[in-house]
Image (cartoon, grey):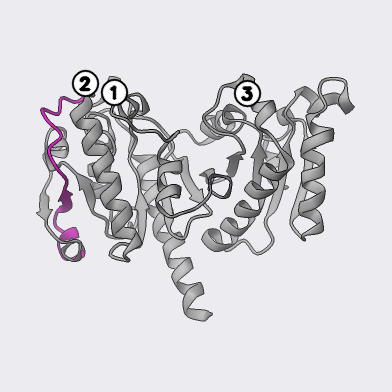
Amino acid sequence: MGDPAGIGPEIIAKAWDARETHGLPPFVAVGDARAIERVWAGPIERIADLSAAAAVFGEALPVLTVGDAGAIVPGEPDADGARCALHSLELAVGLVRTGAARALVTGPVSKSQLYAIGFTHPGQTEFVAERYGVAGDNAVMMLAGPSLKVVPITTHVPLKDVSGLLTVELIVAKARATARGLLRNFGIENPRLAFAGLNPHAGEQGALGREEIEIIAPAIAILREEGIDATGPFAADTMFHPRARATYDVVMCCYHDQALVPLKTIHFDEGVNMTLGLPIVRTSPDHGTAFAIAGKNLAEPGAMIAAIAMAGEAADRRAQTAAQS
């Protein structure tokens, strides 16, 4: 459910309202049921066992209640809510690990509130990866919309640190995980990976920086030797118009905003964050807690709906592949 004071409870409820319109698979909310009751008057069914979720899904939103989130005032996050969000995430990860659920969809959380209670991971992506024993370099945060997929090679780090963090090994590891993930989750047999340069004009042949020559290009060469369709590095400002988007399946970006600015510009209300490189399917809406509008019935559920739909489709594809192997 994410932070109970954010818009997570509202967009989950609205997704349930839209379940038939969008053909969503049955899902269960994990968190404090009162957070949904604060912002929605629809039917809720508290369940104690996940096996009961599908049976009630047609008539009510099933909620697996976790702990006590305290007072729960929409728009006013606190430590109790952060603890509930973390416990909910931990439980949900376990449910998918045991096979009780087929996929994990995470609601938006407040990193500052989580950090205040001792959370030490950069975000939920890294937390989930650790719980599955996946090395950080092999877990990839991909943002996806109907016409664009992007991967930030470095994620939640200061911009001044990006150049020092980029290495041939990191780029190669992220690209390998991306290529495997596009095949496993989207059925793309030979994914096309286009690499954005770090510097303006992709370094202008070294005049504006040498990261493209010394780090990105050598990584691309290794990937091509392995049979991965990797191209670039390209000037980032030429990569996101419609004609360019038709030439690749994903853009590998050097830093957070290089990836997320175009994705959110083009697909703000339907962007999905999917973690590649995990043994499970994990998605989330590509937006934050939006505390300023929480509890005001203003939250758009499009990204949550897209995240649930994408999780279901990816889980189906993995199950079909496993059955055929």
**Comes first in the chain, label 2 or label 3:** 2
Q: Which mark identifies residue 291?
A: 1
* Mark 2: secondary structure: loop
Tag 3: amino acid: Asp
Tag 2: amino acid: Glu
Which range of residues does the magenta coloring cover? 54-75
The relative height of residue 230 versus residue 241 in the rendered view (above or below) is below
Residue found farthest to the bottom: 324
The relative height of residue 46 versus residue 284 in the rendered view (above or below) is below
Q: Position of residue 126 (x, y in %)?
A: 45, 42
* Residue drawn at 15 percent across, 34 percent down: 69
Decide if residue 166 is on the left or right side of residue 295. Answer: right
C-alpha distance separating marks 1 and 3: 29 Å
The answer to whether the residues at label 1 and label 2 have Cβ atoms under 8 Å apart is yes
C-alpha distance separating marks 2 and 3: 32 Å
Q: Position of residue 71 (x, y in %)?
A: 10, 27
